[in-house]
Image: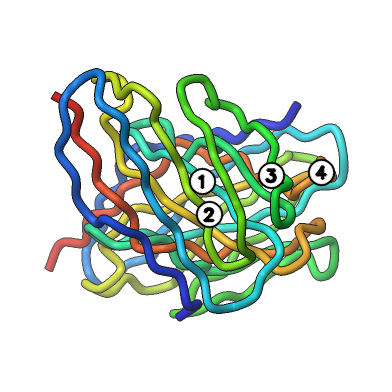
Amino acid sequence: AQSVTQLDSHVSVSEGTPVLLRCNYSSSYSPSLFWYVQHPNKGLQLLLKYTSAATLVKGINGFEAEFKKSETSFHLTKPSAHMSDAAEYFCVVSDMSPGNKLTFGGGTRVLVKP
Amino acid sequence: DAGITQSPRHKVTETGTPVTLRCHQTENHRYMYWYRQDPGHGLRLIHYSYGVKDTDKGEVSDGYSVSRSKTEDFLLTLESATSSQTSVYFCAISGYGGLGDEQFFGPGTRLTVL
């Protein structure tokens, strides 16, 4: 069975400061990992994904994440937060089960203060 | 944006009534998924389809049924709606359903069961 834990349900940052969203996963296989973002009253948009290539993954809008197998972590970072980054972020794991079923973390809501 | 639409976008219904939600895609993707989103739980898989007339259960399938008679349409039915099924429902699609294949999400349907 696979699972995802997002360690913070809410994160508050000031505009221009770094953002760190923490994610730990559990999977029986070598997983694929994703970060999705959801802006208020919108659907989900893919930020980035890891699929066993480079462990440092760059995504859209300046986000990046590092896969650390020894720590079973996939933390999301951005060097400088922008007001438009205010949203909810989901860490997601996919293993080799039929149908590529995804398991979502509970989400981290990011507030960006001016 | 991937061509995914959901209808209706909002619905209010009463306990015990049947409800059908529709997902329509224009991408000719093989895999389609239905999720529900509840606070603190991220998204949870209800059912998915891996082809016309081919469906399987997800994590929270009790009380739901699905049908897929055409590649482009995936229907979710609540045979007798209950208040616990009040949620936001998202449809997603993916091309080949393999490890690392990202899923694209629709805009969501907000369902309220009174």
Task: Tell me what residue is drawn at x 57 percent, y 50 percent.
Answer: B33
Nearer-the-camera pick, B105 or A104 = B105
Badge 2 element = strand
Report how far apart the C-alphas of labels 1 and 2 lie in the structure. 9 Å
Question: Counting residues from the N terminus, which is met first, the one under dot 1 or under dot 2?
Answer: 1
Q: Do labels 4 and 1 share a chain?
A: no
Residue position marked by numbered label 1 in the rendering = B34
Report how far apart the C-alphas of labels 1 and 3 lie in the structure. 11 Å
Instruction: Give the amino acid type for the residue marked by disc 2 in the picture.
Output: Phe
Residue position marked by numbered label 2 in the rendering = B74
Instruction: Give the amino acid type for the residue marked by disc 3 in the picture.
Output: Lys
Report how far apart the C-alphas of labels 4 and 1 lie in the structure. 15 Å
Q: In this view, does A82 lie to the left or right of A69?
A: left
Q: Do labels 1 and 3 share a chain?
A: no
Q: Are marks 1 and 2 on the same chain?
A: yes
Is any atom of residue A47 visible in this view? Answer: yes
Residue position marked by numbered label 3 in the rendering = A101
Is label 1 in contact with label 2 (beta carbons under 8 Å)? yes
Report how far apart the C-alphas of labels 4 and 2 lie in the structure. 18 Å
Q: In this view, does A80 lie to the left or right of A90?
A: left
Q: Quadrant of residue A65?
A: bottom right
Q: Quadrant of the C terminus of chain B?
A: top left
The x and y percentages for residue A1 are 75, 26
Quick one: label 3, few (<14), some, or many (20+) residues within 10 Å?
many
Residue position marked by numbered label 4 in the rendering = A98
Badge 3 element = loop
Instruction: Give the amino acid type for the residue marked by disc 4 in the picture.
Output: Pro
- Read off the chain for label 1: B
Is label 4 in contact with label 3 (beta carbons under 8 Å)? yes
Instruction: Give the amino acid type for the residue marked by disc 1 in the picture.
Output: Trp
